Structures are given as C-alpha cells and as structure tokens.
Image (cartoon, grey):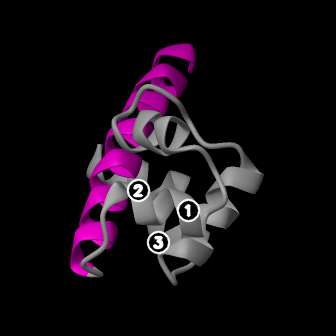
Amino acid sequence: MTGYSFRANILSVKDITRRLKTLRTQRGINQRNTALKASMPLNRYWEIENGYRTPDDKELEAIARALKCQPSDIVPSSQEVMTNG
C-alpha cells in the first residue's frame, strides 16, 4: 500500500508538469504571463511547472484560471494514475 502511494505521487508530479507545460504552450503564453495571471511569483510557477514544488489547492485553482481550464485538467485523478501507471 505504501509503495503504491509513493508511486502514485511520483506519477502525479510527472503528469502535473507535463499537463501544465502542454496547456500553457497550447494557449501560446509563457511562464511569466501565466504566473502574472495566476497572481504568483514567477519562480513559484517555474518550480511547479518543473516539478520542484507541488501546487496547493489555492495555487492550482489560480493556475487553472490563468490557463482557462479546470484544476482536473492539470491534476490527474487517482483513477487515471492507476490506469496509466
């Protein structure tokens, strides 16, 4: 059980970073503008998009608003992690 949780956490971070970069580039905006629209420092957004930091709920909602998507478009559900992992 513990091993699965650890693996799911790793997959989630990997998926979050991939999804963030994909959503951002599809919208044609850079990290600086995404951070500005999310009202967060650029370095914090960079850390999240590059997997050095996991966004808390407030940050996730702000980033989703900035990217004009739903938080679930960024963070995979546990079912997706189990299916794809």
Image position, residue 55 (x, y; %):
61, 43
Q: CA distance from mark 2 to mark 1?
A: 6 Å
Circle 2 residues within 10 Å: few <14, some 14–19, many ≥20:
some
Q: Amino acid at mark 2?
A: Arg
Q: Amino acid at mark 3?
A: Asp
User: Mark 2 and 1 residues: CB-CB less than 8 Å, in contact?
Assistant: yes
Q: CA distance from mark 3 to mark 2?
A: 20 Å
Circle 1 residues within 10 Å: few <14, some 14–19, many ≥20:
some
Image position, residue 44 (x, y; %):
54, 37
Residue 45 in magenta stretch: no
Residue at 49% in and 31% down: 9
Image position, residue 56 (x, y; %):
70, 43
Extreme-top residue of the structure: 2
What residue is pinned by disc 3? Answer: 73
Drawn side of residue 82 relative to residue 75, left or right:
left
Residue 22 in magenta stretch: yes
Q: Secondary structure at mark 2?
A: helix
What residue is pinned by disc 1? Answer: 36
Q: Secondary structure at mark 1?
A: helix
Badge number at residue 32: 2
What range of the chain is rendered magenta?
Answer: 1-26
- Which callout, 3 or 2, points at the residue further toward the start of the chain? 2
Could you say which quadrant of the image residue 64 lies in? bottom right
